[in-house]
Image (tube, coloured by chain):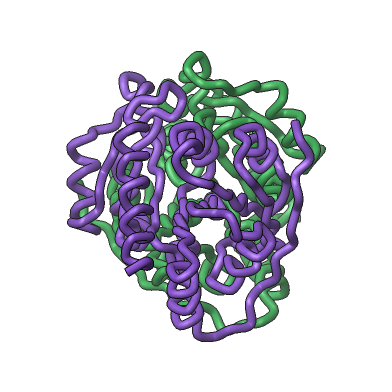
Chain colours: A green, B purple
Amino acid sequence: MKEVRILEIKQSVFADNDRQAEDLRKELKEKGVFLLNLMSAPGSGKTTTLMRTIEALKDTLKIGVMEADIDSDVDAKTISESGAKVIQLHTGGMCHLDAQMTRQGLEGLDTGDVELAILENVGNLVCPAEFDTGASKNAMILSVPEGDDKPLKYPLMFSVCDVVLINKIDVLPYFDFDMEKCREHIRMRNPDAKIIPICARTGEGIEEWTEWLKKEVKESRLQAAE
Amino acid sequence: MKEVRILEIKQSVFADNDRQAEDLRKELKEKGVFLLNLMSAPGSGKTTTLMRTIEALKDTLKIGVMEADIDSDVDAKTISESGAKVIQLHTGGMCHLDAQMTRQGLEGLDTGDVELAILENVGNLVCPAEFDTGASKNAMILSVPEGDDKPLKYPLMFSVCDVVLINKIDVLPYFDFDMEKCREHIRMRNPDAKIIPICARTGEGIEEWTEWLKKEVKESRLQAAE
């Protein structure tokens, strides 16, 4: 595996994260960079989903990935195999990224030639939902083994996401997971969320997801060019 | 399902959590209450494991359970079916419990007749590891679908735990999970951690876990009586 660059990002000193996030979002739009914030619990399959996403979109879009972790660089090393530009962000024990930390990451990544920047946030269903990173869109992954009741227990995460990917549908027969109940629970928290069942391992559902993402990136770039 | 009591616990104002935790641990020991802090990522099977644990120990020990969640009371309702004393703690959005919040929970539960108090912490591999709750012992659950690399990414959680239960071993054939590699990764973080593979759904491995827990509770009560 390739060596990857590791950036130690510092906890931000700005009290007003919401304004910082709005500023960053506006700047990115002007530069034509679409930022996707990808969140989930530990082990839901963020990195495997990212590998599939890059595979599907790399001929259409210039992609850059920021891998945020408390420690280790295993995910960034995996992503580097895809050929996408990647940087590992170490959060120094922090359980989430805010807008200023995301800005540090984007600077480290160097977005000059990037059209789609993806932030793989820290694996955590609580804290990352509380901090607007300045992303154009928020996506989250809920995996089948975690259970269909998660929207009841982690309401904010489901409320702030534009898309919920339900991953690992290949193991549905082995778990007590009710897809219809899960959709209902998600809609209770967020009636507008797009819900896409996928299997990152086999590739099932990935096309619907990457088509959605491609459309969002194009629309955002068109709006910025107007 | 029974109605359960819900307690809204408040964020604590104490800067020195470590001292608060030491004080609580000492008090509990004097009262003969053993406090187990059970942690894991969302959906690892904490509640199902607890149901099995209560089933195995309820004739030997008086058990009380505190279910901490951001929202909902689904877990407390499930636990109430076991016959154990249970209280739901709502953390008001907080991603962890500290010693003072745990103290509020224990007061709400009323530990007068409790020998083994179990705190089901918020589902999160990051923040709960940073706050000593005052527990006699820390346990965590890592489930097979989450992957064997989790100790590399969430080092502190694995360092602070006395026991790691590896749950959902019944689905090992469907996941790319290497048990030996997982044990190695855990030992890197914590050479003394006891590692017990279990399947809360089928009951496999539960006896080893509950025998360990029973022994710890007895030893702690004997030390306190001396």
Position of A128 relative to A217 (above/below): below
Measuring from the top left, give residue A30's x and y in whole percent. 66, 64
Residue shown at 59%/59% (left/top)? B111
Residue shown at 58%/32% (left/top)? A147
Q: Quadrant of the C terminus of chain A?
A: bottom right
Residue shown at 73%/36% (left/top)? A186
Measuring from the top left, give residue A38's x and y in whole percent. 55, 48
Q: Residue furthest front?
A: B226
Q: Is residue B86 visible?
A: yes
Pick the front one: B208 or A47: B208
Position of A176 relative to B196 (above/below): above
Q: Quadrant of residue A87?
A: bottom left
Pick the front one: B175 or B215: B215
Q: Quadrant of residue B89?
A: bottom right
Q: Is residue B167 left or right of residue A191?
A: left
Residue shown at 41%/55% (left/top)? A67
